[in-house]
Amino acid sequence: MASIHLDNLHKVYAGGVQAVTGVSLDIKDGEMIVLVGPSGCGKSTLLRMVAGLETITSGTLKIGDRVVNNLEPAERDIAMVFQNYALYPHMTVFNNLAYGLKNRKFPSNEITRRVTEAAKMLEIDAFLDRKPRQLSGGQRQRVAMGRALVREPAAFLFDEPLSNLDAKLRVQMRVEIKQLQRRLGTTSLYVTHDQLEALTLADRLVVLNGGVIEQVGTPMEVYNKPASLFVAGFIGSPAMNMIPVEYLQAQGATLPEILPDETDLVGIRPDELSLNPPSDASLSVKGTLMLLEPAGAESHLYIHLEGSDQPIVMRVSGVPQMQEGQAIQMYTSVAALHPFNKASGRRTG
Amino acid sequence: MVENNRWGNLFAHLVLILGVAIVVFPVYVAVIASTHPSGTFLRGVMPLLPGPNALENYRTVIFEGRSRAGTPPIGGMLWNSFVMAMAITIGKLSISILSAFAIVYFRFPFRIFFFWVIFLTLMLPVEVRIVPTFEVVANLGMLNSFAGLSIPLIASATATFLFRQFFMTVPEELMEAARVDGAGPMKFFKDILLPLSITNIAALFVIMFIYGWNQYLWPLLITTEQEYYTIVMGIQRMVTGGDSEPLWHLVMATVTLAALPPILVILFMQRLFVKGLTETEK
Ligand SMILES: Nc1ncnc2c1ncn2[C@@H]1O[C@H](COP(=O)(O)OP(=O)(O)OP(=O)(O)O)[C@@H](O)[C@H]1O
Ligand SMILES: [Mg+2]
């Protein structure tokens, strides 16, 4: 168990690709950090730098109190779960779990104890004699987890461990990973591009974009107070609506005084829009219903604002009795507005 | 396809049977010939039915050889061939798997250059470089020795190339997982790469063994002492040595015996690579 400190980490690949730029992050002991961001933003690169599978171009990486920049992965006391599981195909499940311990010269009774214990915890004890190819995807995933567990490392590193599973299994494994991590209290760094996975798993979320950290915070902080336009657009589904302040003013809407001066865009979450005026100070916008998209318990309304090419999405519960093409009046609470500056891309207040 | 099934089937079988017959016939003739007394062949007709002299002929080649023609009993030659073929096979496999390992898993200067150099040697089989190779081997005093018989044939671009191609299909994460699990490069090689390559090794073993076993020109050149004759040379000496007509019954008995070890190797390795084929599949 250990804390992990990333101090101004940079990664430039041979060939000049700048994959990670100036990432600093303090991960507390026992914390579950989720790295999230679009494809190619450098999540895997950052994780692999922590693992020791990629060299660190510059910056300092500490696990516990040790600077580990130049240590081999095996010396960093971490365990990693790979996206494609990377199980040793010719070894039985037992040997897959035991391999790391054998290499570390653990006595065989200790190996057996740890493997059996981990196998029981992950409910793979019935498969210990099988080879990986005789297992289902979900079971392989568990074996990969088991291989990390038995080592009892200072930190777990996960690189999109659930992305090869079907949707249902993914949810189930997500819950199990969370419970397991809570129970063991092992510091974890988890990479995903799935924002739902990120929001549900994380103690703290790190949103990466183009190799740079956009925001660090608890899932609720990130969701409720996105620090940049990028985060606002990336976290939350459907994505946050962005409306230029100019447009609102031209429509005659009265914007609250509290918005900082440099604000030229306001963001509104689809579920913060409603068809009835809220009790507190509110803002109203007019539009035309373009498309009504029922999605089970809720519906998404796509609304065209006159003179704007960006449709607005609104989320309501149930399926409202409305005709496509009808005029619509939407309301939102002033407190729910997210103010941004377009040029800097940052939140203004 | 449906109504023609019967005739199609029949035709397919005919073709197959014909193919088998063409392949098997010479072998059959050789085996049959090895069971006849020497007189049979003077008439210039190849017998197609077994003769009465099988035991006699095989006893002769195994225990007496053909001393007049300078051919020793066959046992020693079989052994020499076996040693040479094994040395070549094991040498080729170990060197090529290690060089492929180096080329695929390590970054060193001129890596690609070395790969192409190895690859280029494909264009230089023994026959092409036989004169300089002989010179080198003679200068090193390796004529009439097992070292001389096998070492010059050991380098193998083909096997290196095949292992390289195979290693490149092994997911990189496997190596990374092993690194995280505390396995150094050689441990990864021994514990993971080698077991995964077993199918390839078995298949190449068969090919290399037969290649080594069938070496003809090279042993003929560098061995002058009976002690180092190989079986393939022995057959050649039996046919051309001495003043009399070739003793076909003895030649054929030798040929039959000479074919046995490669067959055994194939049978033995086949179990391994069929097993490997069904097991490494993910
Ligand atoms: N070995 C490499 N050599 C050069 N560039 C690389 C290498 N690996 C990754 N990159 C580049 O670095 C950037 C970050 O890649 P990385 O794999 O970290 O992305 P990611 O966030 O994990 O994406 P994904 O969600 O698709 O897995 C990408 O632009 C990628 O092209
Ligand atoms: Mg990735």
Image (spheres, coloured by chain):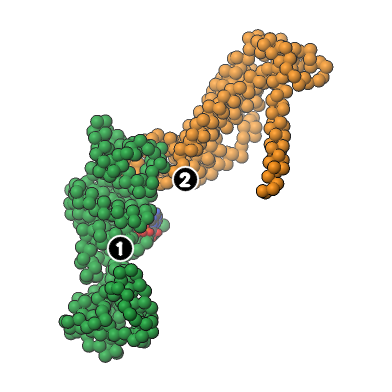
Chain colours: A green, B orange
The image quarter containing residue A230 is bottom left
The image quarter containing residue A238 is bottom left
Asked whether, in this view, residue B32 is left or right of residue A136, the answer is right
Q: Chain of mark 2?
A: B
Q: Residues within 10 Å of mark 2 (few under 14, many from 20)?
A: few
User: Disc 1 marks which residue?
Assistant: A195
Task: Identify the image quadrant of the C terminus of chain B.
Answer: top left
Indicate the amino acid at tag 1: Gln
Indicate the amino acid at tag 2: Thr
Taking depth in this image into account, of A254 and B237 the one nearest to the observer is: A254
Mark 2: secondary structure: helix
Taking depth in this image into account, of B53 and A191 the one nearest to the observer is: B53
**Mark-to-mark CA distance, 1 and 2:** 32 Å
Residue at the image position 63 percent from the left and 19 percent from the top: B257
Residue at the image position 68 percent from the left and 45 percent from the top: B5
Image position, residue A54 (x, y; %): 34, 51
